Image: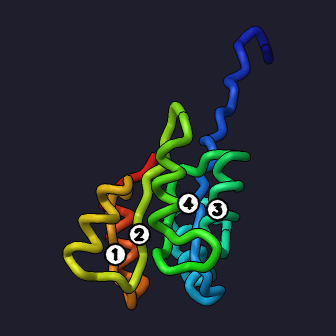
Amino acid sequence: MRDGAPVAEVQQAPVKTCLIVDDSRVIRKVSSKIARSLGYVPVEAQDGMEALARCKRGMPNLVLTDWNMPEMDGLEFVTALRAIPTPNPPTVVFCTSKGHVEDIQEGIQAGADDYIVKPFDEAALRAKLERLEVD
């Protein structure tokens, strides 16, 4: 209290995290820049195994994942991610060169919320993420 009036508590917005999973360092850096500009704290992983370990330590709000990666590919990663019990499952977007209709259907069936085909530009990814309005 100050001068008899209660002091208002300042509430900080919760940190929003975006896990970027891609074996390409360049793609991770570009995606991190876009995620940061949308208010996310980017976290990077170079394959599905590393990404899964990161998710088990702390579930992100958003996951951008490639499909073709060593160790554990994106499809295996998303399937394993969706099997983890969590009160707040992340929004998952495949960012991959696999652009056939069958690939997109398989990715969505594995648990992805959306799909963007590489090569994509910054504006396309930004628009996709803004439309998803991840909390």
User: Rounded to the nearest whole Å, what is the CA distance between mark 2 and mark 1?
Assistant: 6 Å
The answer, for residue 126, to whether it is visible in the render is yes
What is the CA distance from the residue labelled 2 to the residue labelled 3? 14 Å
Q: Is residue 4 above or below residue 14?
A: above
User: Around disc 2, counting alpha carbons within 10 Å, would you say few (fewer than 14), some (14 to 19), or many (20 or more)?
Assistant: many
- State the SS at label 3: helix
Q: Are marks 2 and 1 in contact (CB under 8 Å)?
A: yes
Q: Which residue is mark 2?
A: 94
Secondary structure found at label 1:
strand
Label 4 SS: loop
**CB-based contact (under 8 Å), mark 2 and mark 3:** no
**Looking at numbered disc 4 in the image, what kind of residue is underneath it?**
Gly
- The amino acid type, in three-letter code, at marker 2 is Phe
Reading the image, the residue beneath label 4 is 39
Could you tell me which residue is drawn at 71 percent across and 14 percent down? 6
Q: Which mark is residue 116?
A: 1
The residue at which mark 3 appears reads as 51
Percent of width and height locating residue 37: 54, 70
